[in-house]
Image (cartoon, rainbow, N blue to C red):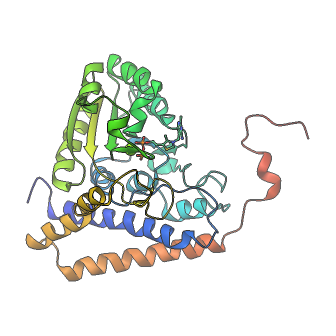
Amino acid sequence: MMSLSSTQAKRIYSMMQFIRKTEEAIADNYSSGQMRCPTHLSIGQECVPAVLSEILTVNDLAVSTHRAHAHYLAKGGSLDAMVAEIYGKATGCSGGRGGSMHLIDESVGFMGSTAIVGNTIPIGVGLGLAKKIKSESGIAVVFLGDGAIEEGVFYESANFAALKKLPVLFVCENNLYSVYSSLKDRQPAGRKIHELAASIGLWTKQGNGNSVEEAYDVCLEAYKHVLSGLGAAFIELDTYRWREHCGPNYDNDIGYRSVAEYEQHRANDPIATFETQLIENKIISQVDCSDVVDEINHKVAQAFEKAKAAPFPDERSSYQHVYAQESV
Ligand SMILES: Cc1ncc(C[n+]2csc(CCOP(=O)(O)OP(=O)(O)O)c2C)c(N)n1
Ligand SMILES: [Mg+2]
């Protein structure tokens, strides 16, 4: 089956389920009011991060956006530290100060995510530049959405990465929306994001970001291109967010997208599609799938228990890690 071994296929399936079950647990627990930060869920968009988890190594670095849980987990970021961060606890990956949008786990090369759209794009390019200057192995991955293409900093960063042939891979998850604005209301009709990136001088490829098979091939080809020193690359992968832009609920009733459109994309569930494929090819059984999910749910439940029981940061530490402060 495809270019993946059975072991790789199983790992990608498990990663997709891991991301979804973690985010479903966030959604289920959110209404209790203990998570005091906004959360942007990637439910429905698990395929691209999961596929990249199979390709990237510890030598590779990654930065992400406001919708960062999936990227952080796929890079190997600590689940316990992420859940604790969302609960604002001292054991969180940003010490409880950042919340859902400020994830970091340097031990696995996940170098950060921020709330400002486009903000991490130049950071990722800088990480690539540093790798090149120091002749370090590995690449820098910049996760970005279709909305980030509308930020000026994307053009400066992409130009520099292309010009200097930096080991940078831009991974654009095109989910058709920036908050409540459809792509067709924001970018000229007929202009393709990957073609725009190609015109800047980046090596590009586009694919179905809900198909493991296709996304894997696109990501692997781009990864090999960048790793071999041929220069920066940009891949555009089509996907769709199921839940509201920010928060645990569904928002198909508020009118910015139709229920029919949602249902159509909902039917392309990357996990269900891949699961069926794996079962049909006898790579995994239905029982194996249930076992994988049970094990993940157990691990996720434990992370939530630990996060809820953890202490809040010491109040006196609130002046640490700030740019400016009054003398006290
Ligand atoms: C500079 C800046 N402008 C606007 C916002 C408000 N904002 C937060 S998320 C978002 C949507 C970005 O869309 P996209 O990059 O496609 O990511 P998606 O939410 O679809 O994953 C916007 C406009 C922001 N956080 N920062
Ligand atoms: Mg988007």
The number of numbered badges drawn on the structure is: 0
Residue at the bottom extreme? 287
Q: Quadrant of the N terminus?
A: bottom left
Q: Residue at x 23, y 37 (%)?
A: 222
Q: Is residue 218 left or right of residue 200?
A: left
| Image region (quadrant) for ligand 2 | top left
Q: Is residue 82 left or right of residue 71?
A: right
Between 175 and 69, the one nearer to me in the picture: 175
Residue 171 visible in this rendered orientation of the protein: no
Q: Quadrant of the C terminus?
A: top right
Q: Residue at x 54, y 38 (%)?
A: 116
Q: Relative to 67, say whether 88 is above or below.
A: below
Residue 92 visible in this rendered orientation of the protein: yes
Q: Relative to 28, say whether 192 is above or below.
A: above
Q: Relative to 110, say whether 16 is above or below.
A: below
Between 129 and 288, the one nearer to me in the picture: 288
Residue at the top extreme? 163
Residue 10 position within the rendered picture, expressed as x and y whole percent measured from the top left: 22, 66
Residue 114 position within the rendered picture, expressed as x and y whole percent measured from the top left: 54, 43
Residue 135 position within the rendered picture, expressed as x and y whole percent measured from the top left: 38, 27
Q: Residue at x 28, y 25 (%)?
A: 196
Q: Is residue 72 left or right of residue 291?
A: right
Between 167 and 40, the one nearer to me in the picture: 40
Residue at the right extreme? 328
Residue 190 falls in which quadrant of the image?
Answer: top left
Between 215 and 288, the one nearer to me in the picture: 215
Residue 298 falls in which quadrant of the image?
Answer: bottom left
